Image: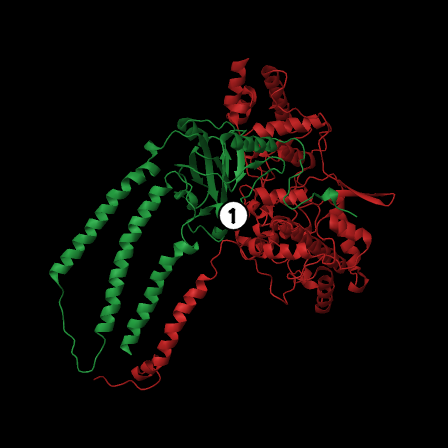
Amino acid sequence: MQKLWAAFFGVVLGAIFLLCVVSPFVGWWMPQNVSSFGGDVDNLFYIILYITGGAFVLTEVLLVWFMWRYARKEGRKAVFVHGNHRLELFWTIATGAILIYIAFAQVNVWERIKYQGLMPQPDQIVTVTARQWEWRLRYPADVTKTDAEGRAWAEAPEVDDVRIQNELHTWKGAKVRIYLKTQDVIHSFGLPNLRLMQDALPGKTIPMWFSATEANTEWDAINFRCTEPDDPAQRWEIACKELCGGGHYRMRGRLYVHADQADFEHWLHDHGKAQDSHEPEKIPSAGGTPVASAGS
Amino acid sequence: MPTAIPGPLSLAALERLFSCHVRWVLAVAVPLFGVLWMSGCSNTIEYARYPEGLVYPVRTDPIVPTDAPPLPAESFYPPGPGRLDEEIAQFAKAGGVTLDPGKISAEDRKELQKALDALFGSPRVPQVGALAESDELVTQLTALKIRDEGDAPFKTLAQGSKVYRYHCVHCHGLTGDGRGPTGPWVVPHPRDYRSGLFKFISTKYEGAPKPRRDDLLRVLRNGIENTSMPSFALLDVPDPENKDSNRPTDLEAVVSYVMHLSIRGTVEIRILQALDSGTSLKDVNVHDIMTQVVGEWANSSFVIQSAGGKTTVADNVLAPAEGSYFDFKVSDYKNAKARDAAREQSIRHGFELFSDPSGAASCISCHKDYGRQVNFRYDKWGTMVRPMNLTTGVYRGGRRPIDLFWRIKEGIAPSGMAAASTLTNEKDVWDVVNFVHCLPYPAMLPDDVRNKVYLPPDEAGKAETAEK
C-alpha cells in the first residue's frame, strides 16, 4: 500500500514533466516574439527554466525513489538521522552561487529594457491610461517629439491629440516610448509578444519603451479599419496582468504594427480627421451594409 | 497505546474513511480534475446561451414617469454606490412622481407576463413580434436590423443575447434595467434601457426621439470616458472562423439586442401605466403598443418612403446646415493669420454666448463656473446628475465637434440639459462648440477669454484694465 503513493507521485510528476517537454511542439508554448529585445528575455527565461527544471527533476526523482525504496516494511526499523553538515553546506553554497549567477546574468537585459536613462530617443510617443477596465491611448498629432517634450506632453494634453481605446499602433522598427498611467487602481500593461510588462501605479507616469521587429497589419482607409491577419497567432494581444477588479478578464487590447511609418501616419491622420469631424459620418461598420440599403 | 474514542469520530472510523478505496478514487480523480480544469483554456471566447426556461420577469421597481423632474430641495448629494433605491426614494420625497408596479394584482401580472413573453420571447430565444407580422412592421424591424431577412428572422438577436450575457448583463441586468449585480455599485449608474431614453442621440425626429443605431454603436466602440462604461471596439472585429458569412459582428448583434430590450421595457412601462390609470388588461392592445414603440425607433433612425411600389430608406440624422461652420484646421484656409483671427473671433463669441447668464444660450446658469461648481439635479431615471465640468476635457458623448454640436443643439433631454433652441443661427451653435472644444486647453483661448475663465475674478479684472 505504501508503495502506491510512490507510484502515484511518480506518475503525476512524470506527466507534468512530459507535458512541459511536448508543449513547445504542439503550440502551447510562448507567443511569437516580435520585440527587439525579446530574444534576450527569452534567453533569460530558458536559463532559469533549465536550472529550475534540472533541480525539479533531480529532487522529484529522489523523492519518488526514496518513497519507493524506504516504504514501510514488516520487521525493518527506521534509523534516526540528525542531518549531514557537509551535504547541507554543499547545497546552500550551490544554490547561492546559482542565484548570484542569475543576478549578474540578467542585469544587462534589465538595464537595456527598464533603465530610464538608457532608453533610446523615441521615434513615436504614446500615453496609455489604464482604468477599470480598458486602456485609453493618446497619440500626439505630431509624431516626432523628443523624450523631454513627450514627458511634458504626457501631463498636458493638446486639443488635436488622437484618442483611441484599446489599440496600440506603431510601425515596424520604430522606437516607441510609452508613458503609462492609471486613473484608479494598479493595473499592469502586458504585451506578451513584446516580452514586456509594466505595472501602472496611481499618481505616477512610468515611461517604458519597445521596438517591434515585425508587422501584422495595414491601414485600410476605404473600410476605415486595419486589416486583420488571418492567422490568430498574428493577432497580438495587450493584456492586463494585475488582477484589477471584476472586469479584469475583459481588459484586453490589440497591438497593431504597421509596415512603415507612412502607413502608420496615414492611419493616425485619418483618425485625427475623423475626430475633428463636423459632419455626421457614417461609422464604417464591419457588419456589412448600412441601414440605408435595407428594405424590400 | 491510547484508547480509541468511541463514536463516529474515532480514529478507527477515520482510518476506515480513508480506506484503500478512497485513496484509489483520489489518485484517479485529482489528475482527471486537473485535466478537465485546463480544458477550458482557449484564446477565443465561447459564449454560452442563457439557460432554458429563464424568462424576463415583469417589472417590480418603481417607474419614474415624470416629464419635469423636480430640483432637489436643498443641496443634495447622491447617496453613493450601492444605494440606487435610496436615490430614487429621495426623488419621490423631493416631489417627483413614481409609480409602483408592485401594486398590480397577481392575476394581471401573470397575464402580462404571458403577453410580453409571446411578443418578446425569452432571454434564450429573444424576438420582437411574431414570425409573421404586417409588411410595414417587418420593413421597420429589418431596417433597424432587429429582424433578419429569411425564414429565421431572430438569429441576430440570439447572437446578441449571448454576447450581452457575457459582457453586459452584470451591470445592465437581465431586462436591461441597469440593476445587474455590479450595477448599483458604479456611479453614474448603468443605463436603464427600459424607459427608451438615451442621452447621446443625433436624430432629427422630434416625437419621442430614440437613438439611431450609430449612436449606440459609437458609445459601445468608444466607451464613455470617466464612467464605468468601457470600450467594446474589439467585439467589432470579424470572427476569424466566420469570415465570409453574412453574420454580423458581435458588437452589431448586441446593439440589436439592446434595442430589443429597450422596446420590451417601454412596452411594459406603457402597459403598467395604463393599468395604473384604471384600464383593465383586457382592453390593452399589447401588439399595438409594440408597433407604436417600434415606429418611434424607426422614425428616429430613418424615413421610409414608398413610391411606385418601391421602398427607400433615408437616414434621419441631424446634420448641420451647409456652410455653417469653419474647419479651422484645413490647410487651404486663406492664410494662417486670417484663420487664427477667425478662430479667435468664433471662440470669443462662443464664450460670450456661454457665459452671459441672461443671454440666448446662458450655459453658465447650469454649468456654474464652467462646470467647476457641483450642481446636482434629477434626471428622468430618478437618479442624480451634474452638469459636466467642461474644463477637464472629458466629453461623455464624444469629443468630435459634431458630437458637441448635437449635445448643444438638441440638449441631453433625459438629464435635463436644455436644447439651445434660442440659438436660431447655427453659426452661433458652432461658436459655442469651438469655445467648449478649446476650453480645457488654455493655450487655445484668446488672452482675454483665458483670463476670464482661468484667473480668479479680481485678478481677471486687473488683467483687463492692464490690457486697456
Figure disc tally: 1
The chosen color scheme is by chain
Query: Which residue occupies the foreground of this view, B264 or B131?
Result: B131
Task: Tell me the residue that label 1 is attached to.
Answer: A231
Place of residue A50 in the rendered image (x, y in percent of width and height, measured from the top left): 29, 53
Q: Residue furthest front?
A: A25
Q: Which quadrant of the rendered structure holds the C terminus of chain B? A: top right
SS state under label 1: loop
Is residue B64 visible to the viewer in this orientation of the structure? no
Q: Amino acid at mark 1?
A: Asp
Q: Which quadrant of the rendered structure holds the N terminus of chain B? A: bottom left
Q: Is the residue marked by circle 1 packed among few (<14), some (14-19), or many (20+) residues within 10 Å?
A: few
Query: Which residue occupies the foreground of this view, B83 or A69?
Result: A69
Residue at 68 percent of width and 60 percent of height: B101
Q: Residue furthest top?
A: B468
Which hue belongs to chain B?
Answer: red
Q: Above or below — where is A257 with respect to B100? A: above
Place of residue A21 in the rendered image (x, y in percent of width and height, measured from the top left): 35, 57
Picture quarter containing residue A80? bottom left
Picture quarter containing residue A109? top left
Q: Residue furthest right?
A: B308
Residue at 27 percent of width and 85 percent of height: B4
Is residue A293 visible to the viewer in this orientation of the structure? yes
Q: Above or below — where is A144 with respect to A73? A: above
Query: Which residue occupies the foreground of this view, B403 or A226?
Result: A226
| Chain letter of the residue beneath label 1 in the structure image | A
Q: Which chain is green?
A: A
Picture quarter containing residue B210? top right
Place of residue A219 in the rendered image (x, y in percent of width and height, measured from the top left): 56, 36
Place of residue B292 in the rendered image (x, y in percent of width and height, measured from the top left): 78, 52
